Each structure stands twice: as C-alpha cells, then as structure tokens.
Amino acid sequence: MALRSWLFVPGDSETKLGKVATCGADVVIVDLEDAVAPHRKADARPMAQAWLDAHRHRVVAGGMKERWARINALDTPYWREDLIAVMPGAPDGIMVPKAAGPEQLQQLSAEIYELEQRNGIQVNTTRILPLVSETARSALGIIAYLESPLPRLAGLTWGAEDLSAAIGASRKRDERGVWTDAFRMIRAQVLLAAHARDIMPIDTLHADFRDEAGLERVARESYADGFAGMMAIHPAQVPIINAAFSPTAKQLEQAQAIVDAFSAQPDAGTLQVDGKMVDQPHLAQARRLLESER
C-alpha cells in the first residue's frame, strides 16, 4: 500500500480536524507538537483522541488510509501525556520529532506496548516514524538505525527547519533551489538507511505551500530519487504530492513488460525489452513498482 502524502493537521483546531479526512491525503497526522502552542497542549489532547477514535474505520472515499499522531519530543514534559491521550484512539502510528536515536525509540516502544494492552489494541501494531535530523547530533547518528532492533519502525523522515536553527544556517537551499551540502547529506542518509532496512523513506515538507510549481518539481524529484512519500503542511499540497508519487500508465506498462519477459524466460540474466537491454536490477525495480500499486 503506497503512502504518498503525509498531511499534518493541528490537533487543537476543530475546523481543520473536521475537514482533513476527506482531503485526499494517504496519511493524516494529528499534530500535538509544533502546530500547538504550549498553553493549548492540554486542550488539544482530547480533541486529537476524539478525532482518531471517530475515524478508526478510515474514510475510504476521501482517500485516507492511515491515521497517525505526532507527539512532542521525548525530552519535553509533554510527550507522555500526549501518548496516553492518543492511544485510546488506536492510531496507526506515532511520529516522533527530534528523535535522539534508536535507544530513545526503544524506550518509547515499551511505553506504547503498555498502552496497547491497556486500551485493547493488538500489541506491536502501533508503528513509529522518527524525524531523525532535527539536531546535529541526531543527524550524525542516522546510521545507527540500520542495526537496532526496532520492529515498530515504519520508516525514517527528516526535517530541515529545526536543523537549520540548530546549526545556525541562514539558508537551506542555494540560488538554484538545490539543498545545500549539510541538508543534502542528511536527505541521502535517510533515503539509504531506510532502503537498507526495507522501511519507508519519507521526504521532508515543502515549506512554501503557495509555491505549487516548486512543490511539483521537488516532489517529482523526490519520487525519482527513491522516496516513498512526502510530508505536507496544507491540503492544497496533497494532490500535487499524490500525483508526483504515482507511477504513470506508461511506467506501469513498461514494468509489466519487464516482468512478463523474465517470466517467459526465467533462466535469462539479460533480456531485450522494447529495444532496451534489461537485467536483474531492472526486474527488481519493475516488481517493486508494480507491488506499490497493489
């Protein structure tokens, strides 16, 4: 199941919560962190829980496939109350901001396990998606996720805004609109580490939600680079991301032709398909593309 668009919605906005389920996002993330001011945290928790509970069976007509919650960072006094509040709504997963490393996520996983049991949720079904780049130290530790026993780990994602503040960067992209070196390095590590673990690499958001042309460009580049999906901060970004992360009919046709050719000649190492030489890596890529559409 392809999870292309990951849309944040403020956990303390009844208006936005009331509209978000049918906006077409594959994943809706009820946000209790950045989108909610400190004095509103207590009000947001029951609202987030009520929304999650009301949409347990998902809104298939609107395209929503999963419901997630972003709690506050694990070095704040808010996160445990966030977790206790949202778990009765049986979210599909928990997004963890400013993740400090695998050991921290193992501790969180233990807390989730207890809350699954307490709330009658099948144990070990609540997944975790950490933002792994929001401090310099955590960004340098992305490789640690490769070997750590984290069965709940659904993917890896990253963010540029907090990191730029942490390192004192006055820019994130150069004059061509390309990520500068530090951010490009982190993005590549997230992509490679996620694929090495066979989990989802989710690309960071495009901060200017009015820049539809820019979003279309970066989203298509992200899909071409191998990311599985991308975060969004406004419903208007969702259809652009969904389109960019969906293979075209021609791509699916080409992939099926490669699979069919090797099925007809299973002992072949290399074949000619539509005038081009293809081999086993092309076959693996074709199968992966077709599987993503099922």
Image: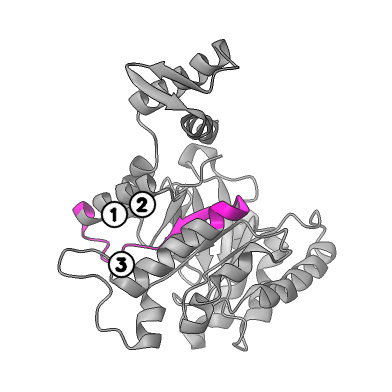
Q: Residue at x 80, y 53 (%)?
A: 122
CB within 8 Å, label 2 to label 1: yes
User: What amino acid is at disc 1?
Assistant: Val
When the figure is inspected, residue 13 is found, relative to residue 75, above or below; the finding is above
In the picture, residue 128 is in which quadrant?
bottom right
When the figure is inspected, residue 95 is found, relative to residue 261, above or below; the finding is below
User: What amino acid is at disc 2?
Assistant: Ser
- Badge 3 crowding class, 10 Å Cα cut-off, few under 14, some 14 to 19, many 20 or more, is some
Asked if residue 113 shows in the view, the reply is yes
Q: CA distance from mark 3 to mark 2?
A: 15 Å
Q: Is disc 1 placed on a helix, strand or loop?
A: helix
First in sequence, mark 1 or 3: give its number.
3
Magenta run includes residue 37: no
Q: CA distance from mark 2 to mark 1?
A: 6 Å
Is 286 or 216 nearer to us in this picture?
286
* Mark 1 vs mark 3: in front: 1
Residue 66: give its label.
none
Q: Which residue is mark 2?
A: 222
Q: Residue at x 19, y 52 (%)?
A: 213
Q: Is disc 2 placed on a helix, strand or loop?
A: helix
Asked if residue 84 shows in the view, the reply is no
Looking at the figure, which quarter contains the C terminus?
top right
User: What amino acid is at disc 3?
Assistant: Ala
Q: Which residues are magenta?
A: 194-213
Q: CA distance from mark 1 to mark 3?
A: 11 Å
Q: Which residue is mark 1?
A: 218
Q: Is disc 3 placed on a helix, strand or loop?
A: loop
Residue 30 in percent (x, y) is at 52, 64
Q: Which residue is mark 3?
A: 207
